[in-house]
Amino acid sequence: EIMPSLVGSEMCKETDHVLGALYGEGINLLRLAARPVPEISWAYRFFLDCAGSLEDAAVQRALREVERLSTNLRILGCF
């Protein structure tokens, strides 16, 4: 399980693009949560739990795409 976090400026648009990147690589999304970023108007931090391993090629491709589509991608954990 992988736990990435990212910041997006438009909640619906960012969610659609992130989900599309994961879906395109066949990665199961286990949980999605969004919280406002207090310092930035209309920005949200997304927290995801995804099935897979950082060693999987599909996961690496999806995370590269998510990083391209968003800002401040962080991997909070992998287990």
Image (cartoon, helix red, strand yellow):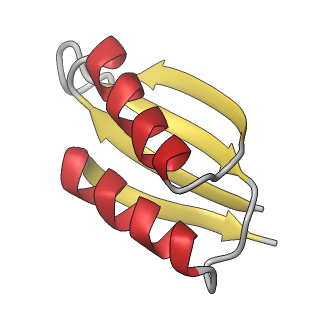
Q: Nearer the viewer, residue 61 or 11?
A: 61
- Vertical placement of residue 18 versus 62, above or below: above
Question: Which residue does the image show at 23% across and 18% down from the upper left?
Answer: 10
Residue 63 position within the rendered picture, expressed as x and y whole percent measured from the top left: 42, 63
Residue 22 in the figure: left or right of residue 40: right
Image height of 64 relative to 9, above or below: below
In which quarter of the view is residue 55 placed? bottom right
Measuring from the top left, give residue 45's x and y in whole percent: 41, 33
Point out the image quarter for the N terminus. bottom right
Name the side, left or right, on which 38 lies relative to 33: left
Name the one closer to the observer, 66 or 77.
66
3 sits to left or right of 15: right
Q: What is the x, y in percent for residue 57? A: 53, 80
In the depicted structure, whether residue 33 falls above or below residue 63: above
Residue at image location 54% in from the left, 42% down from the top = 23
Number of disc labels: 0
Query: Residue placed at 61% from the left, 78% from the top?
Result: 54
Residue 42 higher or lower than 5, as above or below: above
- Residue 44, horizontal then vertical, whole percent: 35, 25
The residue positioned farthest toward the right in the image shown: 79
Quarter of the picture holding the C terminus: bottom right
Question: Looking at the image, which residue sits at the far bottom?
Answer: 55
Depth check: give the residue in front, 8 or 53.
Answer: 53
